[in-house]
Amino acid sequence: MQTQSVSSWRPERLYFRTVTDERYIAIGCPYLMSQEYPVLAAARPLLAYNTMLHGFELDAEGDERHFGNWDAVRIFDLQTHGEVSFIGEQTIRFPDGVTDGWISQLVAFAGRGDLLHVIAGLSRDGLRSMEYCLAELDIQSHAVRPLALLPAVFM
């Protein structure tokens, strides 16, 4: 189950329960972290989701502005109730020539639950321009392999 605030900004949260549980259990305990784009593996009891770290800062006029930065792709085992993989800025492996990037969305598990199809933003010029593509993310090696360029995508 994914929750989303209706009236004012709050981070999105993920909860789960088994059919025998009476209550939902929160996944992790993020503070200003949104848990987004959850996908389930068909072959294994795994849940993958994207996390965004949110914050607030004052602009030049003194108005508070919200911002969010990609944090990680996290894999959660629904049987053991624990995180089994963390693919973040320090561990993700982008293709040769890519200087910066991020995972903007999760699409689906692939293979036997060892790959994720994702939407990745990739930059070859230090974030001056970003290309978005459908890509494969290997859960073990943390390698991103572009599959198809998504022209005219603005995220």
Image (spheres, rainbow, N blue to C red):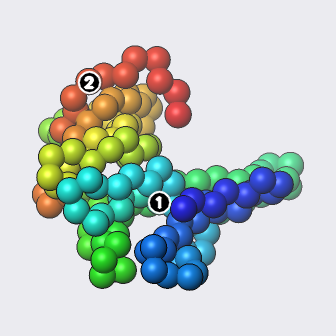
In percent of width and height, residue 47 lies at 35, 62
Residue 70 visible, this angle: no
In percent of width and height, residue 75 lies at 32, 65
| SS of the residue under disc 1 | strand
Q: Residues within 10 Å of mark 2 (few under 14, many from 20)?
A: few
Which residue position holds label 2?
Answer: 148
Q: Residue at x 28, y 55 (%)?
A: 41
Of marks 2 and 1, which one's residue comes earlier in the chain?
1
Q: Residue at x 61, y 69 (%)?
A: 32
Q: Residue at x 56, y 82 (%)?
A: 22
Give the number of the disc on residue 67: none
Task: Judge whether 57 appears above or below 149 on screen.
Answer: below
In percent of width and height, residue 24 lies at 56, 76
- The amino acid type, in three-letter code, at marker 2 is Ala
Q: Determine which quarter of the picture holds residue 92.
A: bottom left
Give the number of the disc on residue 51: 1
Q: In the displayed structure, does residue 41 sit left or right of residue 121?
A: left
The quarter in which the N terminus is drawn is bottom right
- The amino acid type, in three-letter code, at marker 1 is Thr
Task: Judge whether 8 appears above or below 152 on screen.
Answer: below
